[in-house]
Amino acid sequence: MGVLEDEEDYLRYLYSPEVRNTNVRKTYFWLFVNVVIFLYFGIVFAIFRNDLFNPCVKDLLIWLSVYAVITFFHIVRIITNICIWKHAKDPKLISLKMEIFFGFWVYLAELGWTFYGNFILYRDSFNVSC
């Protein structure tokens, strides 16, 4: 028949080592960005941890703590994506399924927590107490 006899040959041709390495490198970049954000949250938390009696700082640290957990889940999602692109037979399909399921929940939590952070920032009692 054709040059590619079966599905495995087709997948090997479609996802050559060059294609896989390119996607893994791009994903490593986003892993680096998320780790830097996570470390930034840790540094801010370390700087302000002794000032917990100030209600503004307490609200900020609670918000940052939850956002750090969400960022940690982003890091787990990215590491999972790297493993998929390194080892899966059909990485694009598995990666898409993982992003739809896992990414949906992480991005939904991030969106909700960002809205909540805006309510903290712009409420009247916050402005009076600070």
Image (tube, rainbow, N blue to C red):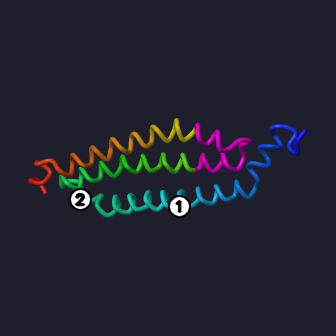
Furthest-left residue in view? 128
**Dot 1 corresponds to which residue?**
32
As for residue 87 lying within the magenta part, the answer is yes
Depth order, front residue of 79/3? 3
All told, the count of numbered labels is: 2
Residue 60 as seen in the image, left or right of residue 129: right
Range shown magenta:
79-97
Q: Label 2 neighbourhood size at 10 Å, few (<14), some (14-19), many (20+)?
A: few
Residue 61 as seen in the image, left or right of residue 73: left
Amino acid at circle 2: Asp
- Identify the mark at residue 51; answer none if there is no mark: 2
Q: CA distance from mark 2 to mark 1?
A: 30 Å
At a point 56% along the width and 50% down the height, the residue shown is 78
Type of secondary structure dominating the magenta stretch: helix
Depth order, front residue of 35/29? 29
- The quarter holding residue 31 reads bottom right
As for residue 32 lying within the magenta part, the answer is no
Picture coordinates of residue 82 (x, y %)?
Answer: 63, 51
Q: Nearer the viewer, mark 2 or mark 1?
A: 1
- The quarter holding residue 96 reads top right
Q: Label 1 neighbourhood size at 10 Å, few (<14), some (14-19), many (20+)?
A: few
Q: Secondary structure at mark 2?
A: helix
Amino acid at circle 1: Phe
| Quadrant of the frame with the C terminus | bottom left
| Quadrant of the frame with the N terminus | top right
Picture coordinates of residue 43 (x, y %)?
Answer: 38, 63
Q: Secondary structure at mark 1?
A: helix
- Identify the mark at residue 67; answer none if there is no mark: none
